[in-house]
Image: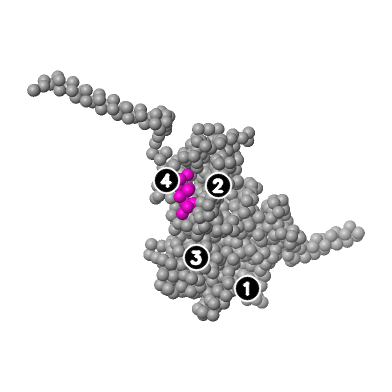
Amino acid sequence: MKRNPGEKLTGRIKTVIIAVLSLSMVLLLCFFWFNISMKDIQSFSIDNLTRVQVNESDMLSASETFVPSRISFNAGNGAYRVFNSDEVNCWATEDKNGMADLLAASIDEGVFFAEEITMKQYEDMKNTASITAIFDYGLPFKDFCSLIAEKPPQESDYIGAIAEVSFSTASTTNLFLKDNQNKYYGITLSKPGEYLSQCVNEHNTKNTVTYFPMDSYLGEAISNKTLVPVELNAELNDFVIQRDFDIKDSKHIDELAKRFFSESFDFVRKIEEESGKTVYMYGYGRRILIADVDGTLEYKMQAQGDAGSLSYLQAFEVARAFINRQGGFFTESGQELKPYLKDGEYNFDKSGGSRFVFGIKCGKYPLLSASSDAIVVEVSKGQVTYFKKCFVSFSESNATRESRQAMSAINVIAKNYKEIYNVMEQNMLLGEDEKKKADRFSVVSDKIENMSYGYVFGGDNIARSAWILTYDKQDFQMYFSLYDGEFLGYRVN
Amino acid sequence: MKKLVALVVMLAMLLLSTTVAFASPDPNITIVNPANSTTVTSGSLLISVKIAKKQTVRVSLHKNNGTDSNPAWQAIFTNASFTSKNNLSFYTRKAENISPGKYRVKVDTIRSDGNPIYVTYSNVTIKENVEADDKAAYNGTGGTATFLQSLLKSIFGN
């Protein structure tokens, strides 16, 4: 039977209505079943997806993470130039002729040979025209070999964590290594480092800040070889930072907490302390999360079972996956941060645990908190047992201004050595022999392990340009204004 | 007559004291680098002067274009005055493109009227940096004995 056009149209409208009603029914069912509110729909965005679970490509890989903290070039005349490892192309290169590449080739070709040498031999090599890659964290040499080569050599078992790797133009078929136990090794390469020799010449003639060892400025009474710039013109500017969350935003804090407790969140006890902290507790304290007023999240978990200890590299992958689940290196406002491995140690707990401390950079300078690191992760028995996160948002464009002369680094110490000594004394960071010495300036100068500059922020949420004096393997830092040397603060771990 | 004698004595003392002071080094100044009578093999020179008092100094570098017995000092640089605002501070500067020869770092301690009251010197010889790397050449033994020694040490301790 042939239908007229009016009946056809009515039929189509009916079909559309039935389809819409069916769809609405399914959606309503979803609303009730998954407890979705209208607010959830309004706040849904692509950002939310990336914040909670970060794309693999946005996460740091092991080879991107385990790079030298800085690289120094010696012209062979006592003058040095210092760079971030990503500013110079001499560690791992595309053409496979960087320091790490030559070491990998030596291992893979079976030429690798490590011979213990004396400190004097090592220093003699460093004093020639040379490159030194410096590591502020303790990457075990065996793990490093696993990372760059097919199989770590047998000798790598007897070498500790890497402190420095040097290449000297006086001996181009070797690399020289200092480990964290102050042992020194000469390593045989399978081919001469011709490209590295070129790097030495190229970087030593660059018109950049020149550094000299501290004892060159202070005389023979000091035996400290820490590199210090002669004079510095810097473009660093103070700027405002925003904490990652507001502790008063209870719903947001709950959302953050759900990432840590996931499916067991219904059984989590929430305590709001008078100090402003919010504490989440699960299983009689077996898992605890503290959201603090300064925008830090601190998570502690008792390790369960005995999964056995992991290597540093394996533990890194566990830590990395955990960081990924907590939103990676993105702030809650969606800003992508520039992380770097600031500190770390294998067997920190004497039972095979691994510790990773990440800092963040603003431009090419570290942005430090006077009280917390950006991320700390501890992995024990295959599980993350400790995690602390302190992220801040900022506008990088506010962090620089026209270049101007910073206060001389040596004069920062000279101006503040009494203050530094007092802080050390109060925090019991001085040995008995050091306390007996009358020359406090020498005591303070001799103990400095690194002198760098960057930004430091405290409770007032202003990141200030600062000289950063590092002592005791980063357990103690003092901060002074970059341009006038005024005391800004200190941090003792 | 008495007045004249007193005036002569005063003038003599003044001249004598100025002469002595002018010739003597400042006890509050130490030229840390380069240390006096040292030889440096480099084309650049770090100058570091320790100032142990709040005072003003003027640092200069001179090259001897004459001989030891008949020096002819040519100024390489003379800096503007540097005032130490603390009881301890350092004047530091890197002098670049220094040709081989005999040099003198001179530190004038300046009075408020701008005249020097002390002069402190440090003499240094700059030599060309030849074959410095060869002297430090590393000759790895590559010996199995050394490796075994390290291995045994790590097993049984030192």
> For residue B42, what is the image quadrant?
bottom right
Q: Main secondary structure of the magenta part?
A: helix
Image vertical order of residue A219 relative to residue A478, above or below: below
Foreground label between 4 and 2: 2
Judging by the rendered image, the residue that carries numbered circle 2 is A301
Residue B114 located left or right of residue A261? right
- Using the numbered discs, state the Cα–Cα distance from disc 1 to disc 4 in whole angstroms: 49 Å
The region drawn magenta spans A317-326
Q: Nearer the viewer, mark 2 or mark 3?
A: 2
Work out how far the residue at label 2 is from the one at label 1, CA to CA, in angstroms.
Answer: 40 Å
Other residues around mark 1 within 10 Å, as few (<14) / some (14–19) / many (≥20)? few
**Residue type at numbered disc 2:** Met
Instruction: Name the secondary structure under disc 3.
Output: helix
Residue type indicated by callout 1? Asn
* Residue tagged 3: A142
Q: Amino acid at mark 3?
A: Lys
Horizontal arrangement in the rendering, residue B109 relative to residue B138 (left or right): right
- The local secondary structure at tag 4 comes to loop
Q: Quadrant of residue B110?
A: bottom right
